[in-house]
Amino acid sequence: MNMLDTRIDHDASTGGGTAAPSDDAMYERMINAILEHRLLPGTRLGEDKLAGIFGVSRTRVRPVLVRLAHDRLVTLRPHRSAAVASPSAEEAREVFEARRLIEPRLVSGFVQHASAAEIDALRQCVRDEQAARSHGDRHKAIRHSGQFHGLLAQGAGQQTLAAILQDLISRTSLVLMLYGQSDAVQASPESLRLSNCRCVEHERLIDAISLRDAPMAVTLMLEHLQDLESTLCFETAAAEVDLGSMLA
């Protein structure tokens, strides 16, 4: 089994059967591998290779790649293999600019509409992220960090904006993978410090939400996004890796 096989099959390890996966299942396994930073920007996604990994025909793989391309997580290239998208520096800045416009409105809505159970779910998400980081499970920690913002959006009572933000959260994962320091492929003391700071910022945001202090929550969200964007380094980018290991 090569590196691409292991990266994709990571999500299949708990499955109980050998039946070919549905299109939705293939999509979920691919998107999880991308969003958890197991598949790096620029990684080639050959249809033959993916068909072999999933145990399906190439015609089953193509719609999945098209769907991921619609999400702007995959780039389709004529006469070449598809690849995990590699956002430009300009696109990265646009993603954060869009988030600064949208998330203050959503966090304000969350303060107004969220139940105690929804606030508790945010706290649990932060605890799960901290636990994952303490156990060295970077992929799971990244997933929980993104889920935090997704939960905020879902509880804000603005479904259209929430859908837009979910797209931006996914694209942010690619941006951080390509240009970020706190989510670098190889962990370093600095990347760990930045990751821990992110958890603290989430906790402060929850505290403001619990007090139903919308202005403070908005301020903290804007500061959080600014701090996150400040970790980007556009002079370097993640190197391409073998597809097999990334989809395990």
Image (tube, rainbow, N blue to C red):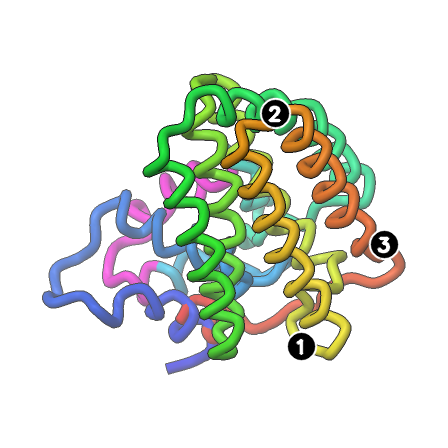
As drawn, the label of residue 237 is none
Q: Amino acid at mark 2?
A: Ala
Residue 171 is situated, as x and y percent measured from the top left of the image, at: 60, 42
Q: Earlier in the sequence, mark 2 or mark 3?
A: 2
Check disc 1 and report its element: helix, strand or loop: loop
Q: Residue at x 75, y 64 (%)?
A: 181
In the picture of the structure, the residue carrying the numbered disc 2 is 214
Query: Which quadrant: the C terminus?
Result: bottom left
Residue at the spot of label 3: 234
Locate residue 49, reporting x and y percent.
40, 65
| SS type, badge 3 | loop
Answer few, some or many: residues within 10 Å of disc 1's Cα (few below 14, many 20 plus, some between 14 and 19): few
Q: Residue 52: which quarter of the image?
A: bottom left
Type of amino acid under label 1: Gln
- The correct choice, above or below, for 223 with respect to 202 in the image is above
Q: Which residues are magenta?
A: 51-69
